Image (cartoon, rainbow, N blue to C red):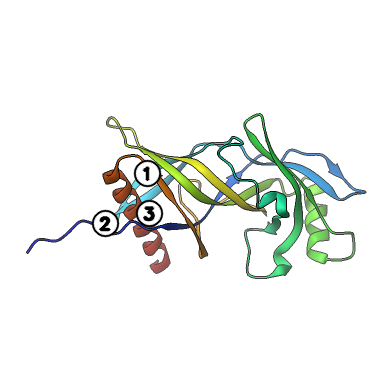
Amino acid sequence: MKHSHLRKVPDSLPMQIQEVRLLAGDVDSETRTIDLVWTTGATVRRRRYVGWDTVVPFDEVLIVSDKAIDLTRMNAGAPVLDSHSTWSTFSQVAVVERAWIEGGEGKATIRFPKAGIDKQSDRMFGLVSDRIIKNVSVGYSIDKIRIEEAQKKGDVEKVIVERWTPNEISFVTVPADPKAQVRSNANTFPLVFDGKPDAHFAAAARMRMAEAVRRLG
């Protein structure tokens, strides 16, 4: 009996996150605003599953440009969260006032509420101002990818993210394992593939398989 290896291509992917170790910025205590860098477009080594028990590494490359990044959500007042927590409004500590692309980096000015309104926000503003918390992370949806298969032994597959949408910025303590793809189970977003059809089917199936395994694990 023959088994079919054809799997359905998903039309959406869950939200992704990527950490940025650089928190550069001017802190204005009067306006309670901070300028920071939320993406540098660095290549991140991630991993996917082949079958149920074989892990294969691949590199995710975020393109950082005005054409590649949709800043609509960011400039509509995207939330600034504590550790990507989206389950309660108590997790929001600030708001994005303005986001832009400059010098191959994604930058933003964020604003905290007035002192005394929210204890969590006051605590976070104090820790960031005092340079205790220095890491930020961006939560984003992938809109279009291009896959470059490994060309020779020792190389890994590259997933070039040609269009993506940042949805929120988070302050984090210890960044997640950069080799593991961290996904939210709450929301999915449309995805466009660019490349050979066979590669599309294989890559999409691998991503969906990895998600299923993580939910079961």
On-image quarter of the N terminus: bottom left
**Of marks 2 and 1, which one's residue comes earlier in the chain?**
2
Residue 177's x, y, as percent? Answer: 51, 49
Amino acid at pointer 2: Gly
Residue at which label 3 appears: 207
* Rendered image: mark on residue 76: none
Residue 124's x, y, as percent? Answer: 78, 56
| Side of 41 where 197 appears, left or right | left
Q: How crowded is mark 2: few (under 14 residues within 10 Å), some or many (20 or more)?
A: few
Residue 114's x, y, as percent? Answer: 89, 59
Q: In which quarter of the image is residue 205?
A: bottom left
Residue at which label 1 appears: 57
Q: Nearer the viewer, residue 132 or 114?
A: 114
Q: Residue at x 46, y 51 (%)?
A: 180
* Residue at the outermost right position: 30
Look at the numbered disc 1 and give the secondary structure of its residue. Answer: strand
Residue at which label 2 appears: 51
Amino acid at pointer 1: Pro
Q: Nearer the viewer, residue 68 or 176?
A: 68
- Give the number of callouts: 3
- Distance between the Cα atoms at labels 2 and 3? 11 Å
C-beta proximity under 8 Å, tags 2 and 3: no
